[in-house]
């Protein structure tokens, strides 16, 4: 007679074989322990590096690092940088150091304001995915504005742009 999964389980008591193995296996406490021993350990997150044996799980560690780096870049740099390029499209308008410094400050402000807008005005929960999508949409809008200003300046339509403002 086997246990669930037809794997026989041997019980030892004081180094002797228990003759009534079937009656012990029918005990609910023993069945619960057998079922608990068969559940594989689960990782807490897909992206956290775990140790398997003596080696570190390299793909999970690399993916965790890339995810953290892109998240910090999205929060602290990209929205402000695209906003600065939309406001000052020419390279001569601002120096690179000033542009990067203003980008970092404006990114934090844009993240806070977009999160508040997302939660209070639109009524959407501020989860990581929702905020990421909102920041990518805002950055895309600023990039489109920058591209439109460059195209208008290239074709000499400055009068059209100023009259619309």
Image: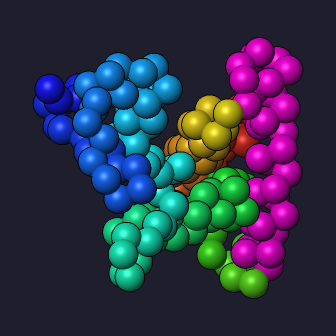
Q: Quadrant of residue 123?
A: top right
Tell me, yes or no, whether the highlighted magenta stretch contains residue 164.
no
Please report the residue visible at 85 percent of the width from the left and 20 percent of the height from the top.
120
Q: Is residue 116 left or right of residue 62?
A: right
Residue 96 visible in rendering: yes
Is residue 62 visible in the rendered structure shown here? no
x 45%, y 20%: residue: 28
Display coloring: rainbow
Is residue 107 shown above or below 50? above
Please tell me in which quadrant of the rendered image residue 26 appears. Answer: top left
Nearer to me, 18 or 97: 18
Percent across and percent down for residue 69 are: 57, 68
- For the point 67% across and 33% down, the residue is 127
- In the picture, measured across the screen, residue 80 lies left or right of residue 8, that is right
Which span is picked out in magenta? 98-126
**In this picture, is 109 found above or below 73?**
above
Q: Position of residue 47 (x, y in %)?
A: 47, 57
Q: Position of residue 104 (x, y in %)?
A: 77, 67
């Amino acid at each position: 007679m086997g246990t669930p999964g037809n794997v026989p389980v041997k019980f030892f008591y004081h180094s002797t074989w228990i003759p009534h193995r079937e009656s012990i296996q029918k005990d609910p406490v023993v069945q619960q322990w057998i079922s608990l021993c068969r559940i594989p350990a689960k990782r807490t997150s897909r992206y956290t590096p775990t140790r398997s044996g003596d080696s570190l799980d390299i793909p999970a560690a690399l993916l965790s690092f890339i995810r953290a780096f892109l998240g910090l870049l999205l929060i602290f740099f990209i929205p402000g940088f695209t906003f600065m390029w939309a406001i000052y499209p020419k390279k001569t308008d601002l120096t690179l150091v000033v542009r990067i410094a203003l980008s970092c400050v404006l990114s934090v402000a844009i993240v806070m304001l977009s999160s508040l807008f997302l939660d209070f005005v639109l009524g959407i929960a501020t989860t990581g995915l929702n905020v990421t999508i909102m920041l990518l949409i805002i950055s895309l809008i600023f990039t489109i504005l920058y591209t439109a200003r460059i195209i208008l300046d290239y074709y000499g339509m400055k009068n059209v742009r100023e009259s619309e403002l």
